[in-house]
Image: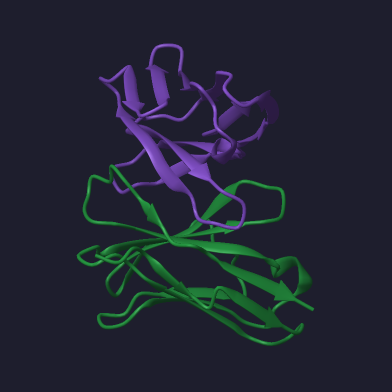
Amino acid sequence: KNQVEQSPQSLIILEGKNCTLQCNYTVSPFSNLRWYKQDTGRGPVSLTIMTFSENTKSNGRYTATLDADTKQSSLHITASQLSDSASYICVVTYTNAGKSTFGDGTTLTVKP
Amino acid sequence: NAGVMQNPRHLVRRRGQEARLRCSPMKGHSHVYWYRQLPEEGLKFMVYLQKENIIDESGMPKERFSAEFPKEGPSILRIQQVVRGDSAAYFCASSPSIPVYEQYFGPGTRLTVT
């Protein structure tokens, strides 16, 4: 069964600190892995997208890594800001038509 | 280029009524996906459509739910005889081509069934 598991389920950090979110998947065959940020009450917004051959991708203070052998990905956020408070969702696509499995997300709270 | 548009943003229906949710994909996008997000849960795939065709509806409940993406106009997700358990946020996403490397999400429609 195609599954995407994210950890931790929730995380509280102080403003300015770094954090790393984890995503493990059993999806096969693999097409791409995406990280989204979802603010409360809004639609998800794409942060990074990685295909099989990529093992790191950055978008500003967000850096995603991918280990296709161990089927693990991480999202590292540096110098966190209050506006980083959101749910971060890992999505693994397993067909060319975009069929995807979504993780349940990690809820990040950044406190001043 | 406007993003994915969804309307209404909020919809309240009484049990037994019909709900119609609309999604206008980004300009030039011919692939539309619908997802449901129950409170405190992750997004779950419902259906994938191209113009005038349902490609994959494996996540759609067998009864009361239907979706269409006509040649002209928005994609419609229709829920007949709504029940309280249908209360959720419904998100639409669109993509420009296959293979799909990116899906762009709309702001969602929050359905409340009273």
From where the camera sits, is residue B80 visible? yes
Q: Position of residue B76 (x, y in %)?
A: 44, 77
Which residue is at 41% across, 23% downward? A64
Q: Position of residue A50 (x, y in %)?
A: 32, 29
Along the viewing direction, whichever of B34 and A40 lies nearer the viewer:
A40
Which tint was used for chain A? purple
The quarter of the picture where the N terminus of chain A appears is top right
Which tint was used for chain B? green
Which residue is at 75% across, 75% downward? B83
From where the camera sits, is residue A103 visible? no
Q: How many marks?
A: 0
Residue A71 shown left or right of residue B61 in the figure: left
Which residue is at 67% across, 24% downward? A13
The answer to whether A48 is drawn above or below residue B110 in the figure is above
Q: Quadrant of residue B82?
A: bottom right
The quarter of the picture where the C terminus of chain A appears is top right
